Amino acid sequence: GDSVTQMEGPVTLSEEAFLTINCTYTATGYPSLFWYVQYPGEGLQLLLKATKADDKGSNKGFEATYRKETTSFHLEKGSVQVSDSAVYFCALTPSGTSYGKLTFGQGTILTVHP
Amino acid sequence: DTGVSQNPRHKITKRGQNVTFRCDPISEHNRLYWYRQTLGQGPEFLTYFQNEAQLEKSRLLSDRFSAERPKGSFSTLEIQRTEQGDSAMYLCASSFPFEDTLNTEAFFGQGTRLTVV
């Protein structure tokens, strides 16, 4: 079945550092790929998405590129802020299905210190 | 619209008791999803509805679990004869159907945290 694997966490960075959170997936065909973020005390929020190979999703300074050849969707940000501290989830939906039926990775906790 | 609303936010119950959670989706959304999230893990899909029809159920949804959406608006998730392994966060999400290509993002509620003692 479909699966998503994220890099082990937690990740601790200083403010303005570069962030990479690795995500690889296993799925048939061409799934849609997502990054969701969960801030403390809040629900999951969609951060960005990409629906076909070589697409780049971006939002709030975060970026991720859909790499079919490496089955990856790594999340990057050039300069993190304390307010980026949260749990980040990589997820996919199979091609041709609802964007609400998601397979999630295990999540990566990010803590950014001033 | 205030987004997806879930009640209660927290529930503590004794093993063997029945519990019911409620989800109120965003009003224009006709798809509604239930997920379960255990500590340190990502959410796992349980089931989803389009309007009042339950279209898919995960193998994780044992016969002690039942979900309904009787009028195509709010939904309930009931767990009968709760076990300690049922302790988790139960998340609800809603969206437009896939065929609506304008906006199919799933919006999540804050969840109901269940503790079975």
Image (cartoon, coloured by chain):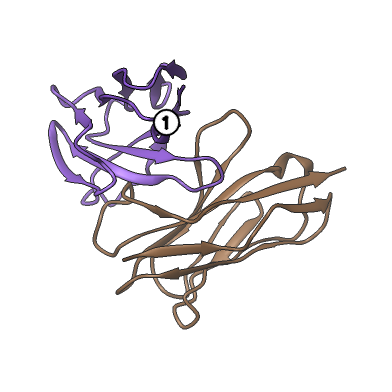
Above or below, comparing residue A72 to residue B86 in the picture: below
The residue lying furthest to the right in this view is: A114
State whether residue B112 is above or below residue A114.
Answer: above
Q: Residue furthest bottom?
A: A69
Chain ID, brown in image: A
Query: How many numbered discs, if any?
Result: 1
Q: Quadrant of residue A31?
A: bottom left
Q: Could you say where residue B39 lies in the image, as x and y percent from the top left?
A: 54, 40
Tell me which amino acid carries mark 1. Answer: Gln
Camera-nearest residue between A105 and B103: A105
Residue B82, above or below B85: above
| SS class, disc 1 | helix
- State which chain disc 1 sits on: B
Image quarter (top left, top right, bottom left or bottom right) of the N terminus of chain A: bottom left
Which corner quadrant holds the C terminus of chain A? top right
- Residue at 51% of width from left, 72% of height from top? A72
Image quadrant assignment for residue A76: bottom right
Residue A101 spot, x, y in % from top left: 31, 49
Identify the residue under disc 1. B84
Is any part of residue B103 visible from this angle?
A: no
Position of B49 compared to B108: left or right? left
State which quadrant residue A19 falls in.
Answer: bottom right
Q: Nearer the viewer, residue A83 or B12?
A: B12
Instruction: Say left or right for B27 vs A4.
Output: left
Chain B drawn colour: purple
